[in-house]
Image: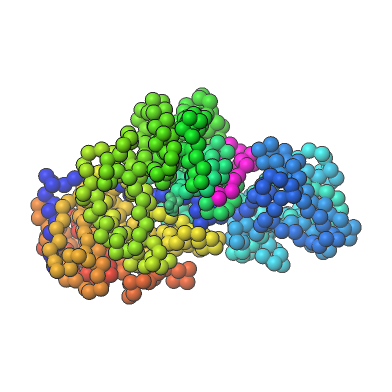
């Protein structure tokens, strides 16, 4: 088999700087109990709903009916999240250790020896009371850190702040608040954050470094179906997710079935994009959910709401909403240049009508903002104006492998494609198999080749907390303290240098061509230039391949050339917590790198040859 690479400058084409990025959705507890480092779940006791009594899950009670009575009431000092917890201690001689409440976080808190955790909570206690706050094992027996807080009796709410330094490690810890004193105490907005978060911005450092290793050029957020909701009343609302964390009402994401306190809100997403040096892509609700819709005749307030959201991001610190951002600590605007008008709503009754209202208003107020339609323009032209259109694909591996040529047939005029969700799923995806990653890699070579009309692409979903895998597979799997990348994650690392690189035409001639896919780029790191040839062998035979490069303006140097191969003994192999690196790219030096060279492609493999240019 022969792979010809024509590297002549006149046939090279620059790949958009934006081509490969990430799509973050609040799904699988990716944010709450995920990259957002808050350890307390349901910190304001609002998750059970605003009626009383309300379910306080996952908070639980320490003590029995004779020693403690706990209920919710509507006496919070925070008007937008009015539920508070009222705890009445009934015992005169309380059990050793006291009675109280505990929160296990999201399937247990990861508390690590020597690390500091900042507790903030609001307390009201008519009588002076000693509260013991502690971090313990899940059964309460191992004490990792504790402090006694004396709350002086008064009828107002008091903000309490306490640093706890752990003197041991426990991956499934809980936060306890106990007392021995008879009387009544109210609690609200109880937060426990690790002191050490990425750039001090509240994100789990090790999960952010997984994203950084992808060098994403954009961050699409916050969903997905999460943006739409099953019902509009449960859709993500940016306005409710900004400002002081204590004053955010939180909401129940009814598509993925869990509560989020919205600590990871609109502002934090913009901050994350900045921290990643990625373009923020704000996907907003356009008045359409899975089950209900706002009639276009009544959409004006929703349009105004979105214009406000853009002002929040881009407005000067003196503007109405820019000043709110500035008060949150970011006087400089966040440069939002892309917005998506809804998610997967093209077929809905009011989508087009609503779309045009949003489109026209945003175009008028912010002529430079690129707008993304939900309607697929890859096979038929759109019937409405758009700068980009969304393209989502979840399918089996064979179909996705063959979809590498999907955009070959797309018209070169009109808006560009944003392949904002792609993945192999169901049947042969496993829980993130090598096979899935090979099909996805082949599909991405097709996107590189069609990057004159494919402007952006991102895998979905990005993250899964292993305790709540609503969607399978995902790129990065984690629990309270461990994480690993699936082969689909590692596959993406071999495309991270493609954005902004020069693409060169490739031709495969082989009896195996039906199971091979390839692309070639030139790219530079800080010191050297490389011709990168990527080849996917989707078949079960090893293939001897001659790679023949013509038209190069430089010569290929074996010194400094490498081959990186993603493969495994079995095509359905996966990574896991017990074997997180079973299927990862393996890099080796290439002593035979040259304009004409022969390589062996292992069965079911993805090879990336970086040929050093001298
Ligand atoms: O990525 C998971 C879901 O798939 C997204 O929420 C939605 O956009 C798509 O249907």
Determine which quarter of the picture holds residue 388.
Answer: top left
Nearest the camera: 603 or 290?
290
Q: Is residue 430 left or right of residue 117?
A: left
Visual colour scheme? rainbow
Q: In this view, does 520 lie to the left or right of 313?
A: left
Q: Quadrant of the C terminus?
A: bottom left
Nearest the camera: 499 or 340?
340
Residue occupying the point 49% across, 44% down: 289
Please say whether residue 252 is one of the residues in the magenta stretch. Answer: yes
Count up the numbered dots.
0
Residue occupying the point 32% across, 63% down: 397
Q: Where residue 598 sits: x, y (%)?
A: 14, 68
As drawn, the residue found furthest toward the left would be 551
Query: In the rendered image of this protein, does residue 287 appear above or below residue 590?
Result: above
- Residue 16 showing in the rendered view: no
Q: Where residue 563 sits: x, y (%)?
A: 24, 64
Determine which quarter of the picture holds residue 508.
Answer: bottom left
Question: Magenta segment, which residues?
Answer: 241-254
Q: Quadrant of the N terminus?
A: bottom left
Nearest the camera: 37 or 43?
43
Query: In the rendered image of this protein, does residue 364 appear above or below residue 120?
Result: above
Please say whether residue 512 is one of the residues in the magenta stretch. Answer: no
Nearest the camera: 613 or 12?
12
Q: Where residue 5 sits: x, y (%)?
A: 14, 56
Q: Where residue 37 sits: x, y (%)?
A: 56, 52
Q: Is residue 148 left or right of residue 604?
A: right
């Amino acid at each position: 088999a022969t792979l010809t690479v024509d590297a002549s400058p006149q046939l090279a084409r620059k790949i958009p700087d934006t081509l490969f990025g990430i799509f973050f959705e609040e799904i699988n507890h990716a944010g709450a109990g995920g990259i957002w480092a808050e350890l307390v779940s349901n910190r304001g006791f609002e998750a059970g709903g605003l009626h009383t009594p309300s379910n306080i899950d996952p908070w639980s009670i320490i003590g029995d009916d004779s020693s403690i009575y706990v209920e919710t009431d509507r006496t919070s000092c925070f008007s937008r999240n009015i539920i508070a917890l009222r705890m009445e201690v009934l015992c005169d001689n309380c059990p050793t250790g006291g009675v109280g409440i505990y929160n296990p976080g999201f399937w247990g808190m990861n508390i690590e020896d020597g690390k500091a955790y900042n507790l903030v909570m609001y307390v009201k206690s008519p009588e002076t009371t000693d509260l013991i706050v502690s971090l313990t094992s899940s059964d309460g027996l191992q004490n990792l850190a504790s402090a006694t807080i004396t709350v002086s009796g008064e009828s107002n709410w008091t903000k309490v702040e306490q640093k706890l330094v752990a003197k041991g490690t426990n991956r499934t810890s809980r936060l306890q608040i106990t007392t021995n004193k008879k009387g009544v105490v109210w609690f609200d907005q109880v937060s426990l954050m690790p002191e050490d978060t990425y750039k001090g911005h509240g994100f789990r450092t090790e999960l952010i470094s997984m994203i950084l290793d992808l060098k994403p050029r954009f961050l699409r957020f916050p969903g997905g179906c999460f943006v739409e909701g099953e019902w509009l009343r449960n859709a993500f609302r940016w306005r409710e997710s900004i400002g002081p964390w204590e004053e955010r009402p939180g909401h129940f994401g009814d598509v993925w079935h869990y509560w989020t306190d919205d600590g990871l809100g609109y502002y934090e997403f913009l901050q994350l994009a900045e921290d990643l040096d990625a373009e923020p892509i704000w996907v907003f609700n356009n008045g359409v959910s899975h089950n209900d819709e706002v009639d276009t005749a009544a959409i004006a307030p929703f349009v105004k709401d979105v214009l406000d959201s853009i002002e929040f991001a881009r407005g000067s610190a003196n503007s109405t909403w820019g000043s709110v951002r500035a008060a949150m600590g970011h006087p400089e605007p966040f440069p939002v240049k892309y917005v998506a008008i809804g998610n997967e709503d093209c077929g809905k009754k009011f989508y087009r009508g609503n779309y045009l209202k949003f489109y026209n208003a945003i175009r008028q107020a912010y002529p430079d903002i690129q707008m993304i339609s939900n309607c697929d323009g890859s096979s038929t032209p759109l019937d409405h104006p758009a700068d980009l259109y969304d393209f989502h694909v979840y399918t089996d591996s064979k179909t996705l492998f063959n979809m590498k040529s999907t955009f070959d047939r797309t018209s070169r005029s009109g808006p560009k494609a944003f392949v904002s969700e792609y993945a192999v799923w169901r049947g042969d995806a496993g829980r993130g198999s090598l096979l899935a990653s090979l099909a996805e890699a082949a599909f991405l070579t097709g996107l590189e080749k069609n990057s004159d009309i494919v402007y952006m692409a991102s895998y979905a979903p990005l993250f899964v907390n292993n305790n709540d895998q609503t969607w399978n597979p995902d790129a990065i799997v984690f629990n309270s303290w461990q994480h690993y990348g699936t082969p689909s994650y590692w596959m993406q690392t071999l495309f991270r240098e493609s954005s902004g690189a020069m693409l060169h035409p490739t031709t495969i001639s082989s009896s195996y061509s039906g199971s091979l896919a390839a692309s070639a780029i030139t790219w530079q790191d800080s010191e050297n230039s490389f011709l990168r040839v990527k080849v996917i062998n989707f078949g079960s035979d090893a293939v001897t391949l001659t790679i023949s490069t013509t038209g190069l303006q430089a010569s290929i140097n074996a010194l400094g050339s490498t081959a990186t191969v993603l493969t495994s003994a079995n095509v359905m192999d996966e990574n896991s917590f017990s074997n997180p690196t079973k299927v990862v790219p393996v890099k080796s030096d290439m002593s035979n790198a040259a304009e004409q060279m022969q390589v062996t492609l292992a069965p079911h493999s993805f090879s990336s040859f970086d040929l050093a240019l001298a």
